[in-house]
Amino acid sequence: MVEDTPGPVAWANTGDSHPLMRGSVDSKTSAAANRRWWDADAEDYHQTHGEFLGAGSESGDFVWCPEGLREEDVHLLGDVTGKAVLEIGCGSAPCSRWLTGQGAHAVGLDLSRQMLRRGQTAMAGGGPQAPLVQAGAEQLPFGDGVFDLVCSAFGAVPFVADSAAVMTEVARVLKPGGKWVFSVNHPMRWMFPDDPGPAGLTVMLSYFDRTPYVETKADGTVSYVEHHRTVGDRIREIRGAGLILEDLIEPEWPEGFEREWGQWSPLRGQHFPGTAIFCSRKPDPDT
């Protein structure tokens, strides 16, 4: 099922936008801009990153970050057999398809119709099937306490204006004891230019400057938005939603791994983390 409502996105930063603008951007503007961005960029994104993400494979794959951390190796979600799982910002849904192949009842949710259509095309060839929903992460279209697990691999969280609302919504749809695990750009990356080379090692912005990164078209239309939060902000958002933070993972750059992805590179990975993975749980009063 593909529904026509605003929602979250996955990770990238490419396109034909004009010089960045910095200023306040609300939820409606962020959703509209990023939805258009990912619809337009879906083909190029998959040509560049699809193989790495397993987007074209019959069984899918679950890659947490550009450092190549895979769920099949780290088991951050635990045993998913028989579990109801929501993936937020699923893109073309390789993670949701992989989860289904592991015995989960997975649902993929994303902002971009074109990204979801790629997921539908992949599933039309066979392999694990997962329902797909086009909707927003700030207002999830699901009932209370229906999922055992919610996950997001670079989807939604950095791209919505009110990420605290995402945490609250996740807590609402989780069952007691359920897990919420999400990966994002490591907050300290905000300080550095999006450059995988030596220029990307020089601090350019204050870590504490939460002004959104905005790209615009020639006519002034906002075409791409990312919102910065510090590590402390993320922890307070999680706790404010009534969730318990159990772990914060900062993947190290793998030895011998030479693949660059935007600002991620072996050079930068030697000096500071590119990804933060927050692992949290909804309290269960019965345990």
Image (cartoon, rainbow, N blue to C red):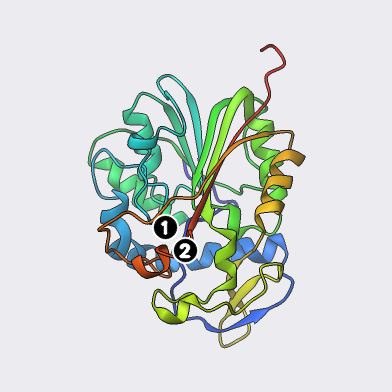
Within 10 Å of disc 2 (Cα), the crowding (few <14, some 14-19, many 20+) is many
Percent position of residue 168, x then y: 71, 40
Q: What residue sits right under mark 2 in the picture?
A: 38
Whole-percent x, y for residue 100 in the image: 36, 30
Q: Earlier in the sequence, mark 2 or mark 1?
A: 2
Residue bearing the label numbered 1 = 114
Say whether residue 7 is visible.
no
* In this view, 107 is above or below 285: below
Looking at the rendered structure, the kind of residue marked 1 is: Gln
Q: Which residue occupies the foreground of this view, 16 or 243?
A: 243
Residue type, mark 2 in image = Trp
Percent from the top left, x then y, of residue 202? 52, 79
Residue 146 position in % (x across, y down): 60, 25
Per the image, label 1 sits on a secondary structure element best described as: helix
Could you say which is closer to the camera, residue 215 or residue 277? 277
Tag 2–tag 1 contact (CB < 8 Å): yes
Q: Quadrant of residue 12?
A: bottom left
Q: How many numbered badges does the structure rendering display?
A: 2
